[in-house]
Amino acid sequence: MNEILRFDGGNQDQLAQQFEHSRRNRVLCLDWLASVFAAPPSLDTVVSYRSCELAIWLDQLAFDPAFSAGIARMQAALDPAHDDDTLTARLGIAYGRLFSGIGGPDCIAPYESAFRGDGRLFQVPTAEMEALLLVHDVSIAGGLAEPADHLSIELTLMARLIAADHPAARDMQLRIGRWVPDFCDTCIARDHLGFWAGAAMVLAAIIDHDARLMQAGVHYFIPA
């Protein structure tokens, strides 16, 4: 992450290019993480993680010291001892146990409402996110039939705001920072297979780094 987000001294054009590179990388990471937490990987996705485009993506992320431990857990969960079909089934079962309510005490509700207030779903955060999606004209593709405060939807909105240089990106970063670290800690503790625990470690590292950038007065907008 230090490679992605380091801004060296230089003229205005060079600094603007560094900000633009940082923003593109952050959008890619957020979109990827949104897809990871939206659904279990399909067979084609598992194949890609093991030997194709997504395998290269994980290897690239692993070069960043802030991401390396999380990526290592994800890669370990892509166990070469299992064939692609078996691994896809294992990951599907693990996702269901973690996020779809079939795991009993290990289940984690990936919704902001579950981590704010009294923990009930469809509370104020859901209505707030519905309003934000309307304001920013963002629709969720891919058939994700979830409440608007689902983690993947919030990450997608933040990615779109960062990509558009929208000032509301800062508010969205603050919003995510209020509940997603607790979600990540819970996911890391409960995901025994390790795929989503590793992704949560990467997401937690991004949130922590972004929080420190905001405290330092740095953002993802190209300076005027």
Image: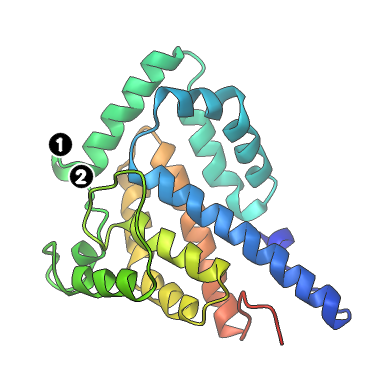
Q: Earlier in the sequence, mark 1 or mark 2?
A: 1
Residue 29, how many percent across, how many down? 55, 53
From what the image shows, is residue 224 above or below residue 4? below
Residue 86 bears which disc, if any?
none
Disc 1 residue type (three-letter): Ile
What residue is at 47 percent from the left and 29 percent from the top? 45
In the rendered image, which quarter is residue 178 located in?
bottom left
User: On the image, numbered disc 2 is attached to which residue?
Assistant: 107
From what the image shows, is residue 58 above or below residue 51? below
In the rendered image, which quarter is residue 133 located in?
bottom left
From what the image shows, is residue 128 above or below residue 78? below
Q: Answer yes or no: do the residues labelled 1 and 2 have beta carbons within 8 Å?
A: yes
Q: State whether residue 46 appears in this view.
A: yes
What residue is at 46 percent from the left and 24 percent from the top? 44
**The C terminus, quarter of image:** bottom right
Residue 36, how many percent across, how many down? 42, 43
Residue 189 versus residue 154: which sits nearer the camera?
154
User: On the image, numbered disc 1 is attached to which residue?
Assistant: 102
Residue 110 versus residue 158: which sits nearer the camera?
158
What's the distance in space between the residues labelled 1 and 2, CA to CA?
A: 7 Å
Left or right: residue 20 compared with residue 30: right
